Image (tube, rainbow, N blue to C red):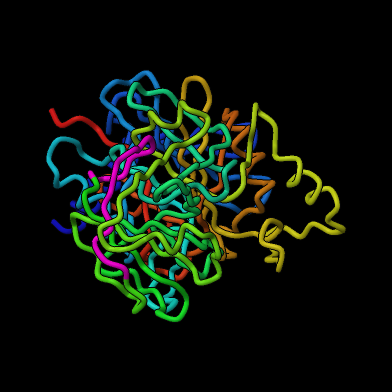
Amino acid sequence: MRFCSRICIVIFLLCLTNTVSYAGGKKTQLFADLSTGLNIYRYDWDKETCVLYVAEISRKEPTLHFEVGLANSQVLGKETVRSIAQRHTQKGDRHVVVAVNGGFGVLGDMRGYGGVLESLHIQDGELITQPTDTDACFGVTDNGAFLSTPVQMKATIQIGSHSLDIGCINQRRLDGCKVILYTPRLGDSTHTNRRRGKEIILSGLSLPLTPNYTHSYSVKTVSNDGNTKIHKDSAILWISSQVKDPSVSLFKAGAKGKINVSLTPPEWNKVKHAIGGRLRLLKNGKINQMLVEMHNKEKKHVPGKRNQVLNLSHEPRTALAYNTDTLFLVVADGRQPKYSTGLTLYELADILIELGASEAINLDGGSSSTFVVNDEVINKPSGNREREVLNAVLITKDVE
């Protein structure tokens, strides 16, 4: 009976797959009946030894949605892609059908900042972290429009007649930001050092923070101790001791002012979900010129070889791409010579063009590259385990 069962399973799986030769490789269809408007396949690239997993999502299918998920529902902390997807599905209104790892940040502890994002994350209309690589961001507005134009944040805090620029939202002070706004989305406390600056506890704000935000505040207290606890109904402004602006002395208990936050171009203020990566791969159907130049200058291209220059190294990769009809989520396995060696960023961009994409950004790669379908990891992450990541891209389906 056990042998017969195995035969039946094999026959069933063969019925679900369909292998087709393609110009640059071979496509093997997977999960054929998972959802209308969703096409998932394994792509064996025949120019070199590399296996990719691809999800093509129709932009015209009303039951499928682009969303993002934050690990542990806060910035500080890590979680597997599968766990993020499962937790999101448990909300009940939508089921996660496909999920891949998201943006970049701190995976190690780094003095309490393990899990902190260093790229854009907007979730359900809440601005959680600001754009860093401003050219490698992707967002979807509340009416379903796709945005991948360069985006920047403009944020200020007014006190009296003075205005101070806010450089970062929920970031490490070590990342060069001298004025940081911490919201409850960061975690329990700021993890700052008392010798490096002061912290102003702000009350009276309406949270969550959004991409287009204006609200008055009142200074509750001012602390020089560092690592201030973050309460759910307040935010904390950290000002580096290097800032010599005269407005700093005006932040005293009882003082009042206003916070202004906006994104440009203005259409980004209508974004419901967004994610940031590092490096734009494709723009208007053309590969990033920097990648082209690096590829052409390479003296000797050795398939599968790793390189100290990460753009030229064959690594596991994750990308988000799209054209006028389709959104693509792509994961390339790597660091497994007999199975898949990975791709350079130029090769990844070139394959995305083969698949039909015209716009694309690079997401976190390496051991983080993970492709989940219906709560199962279907690729082979390097390191032979599913790594905990910072956030994830989710394709959700309406629950019938």
Say which quadrant the C terminus sits in.
top left
Q: Position of residue 265 (x, y in %)?
A: 52, 29
User: Which residue lies at the image location 27% right of the left edge and 63% below the top edge?
Assistant: 253
Q: Is residue 394 visible?
A: no
Whether residue 219 appears in magenta in the rendering, the answer is: yes
Q: Tell whether 156 sits left or right of 35.
A: right
**Number of marks drawn:** 0
- Residue 109 left/right relative to 36: right
Asked where in the image residue 398 lies, by quadrant, the reply is top left
* Image quadrant assignment for residue 244: bottom right
> Magenta part of the protein: which range?
206-222
Q: Does 200 sit above or below residue 99?
A: below
Give how far across and how far down residue 187 sits, in percent.
Answer: 27, 64
Q: Quadrant of residue 357?
A: top right
Residue 131 within the magenta-colored segment of the rendering: no
The answer to whether residue 356 is above or below residue 17 is above
Q: Quadrant of the N terminus?
A: bottom left
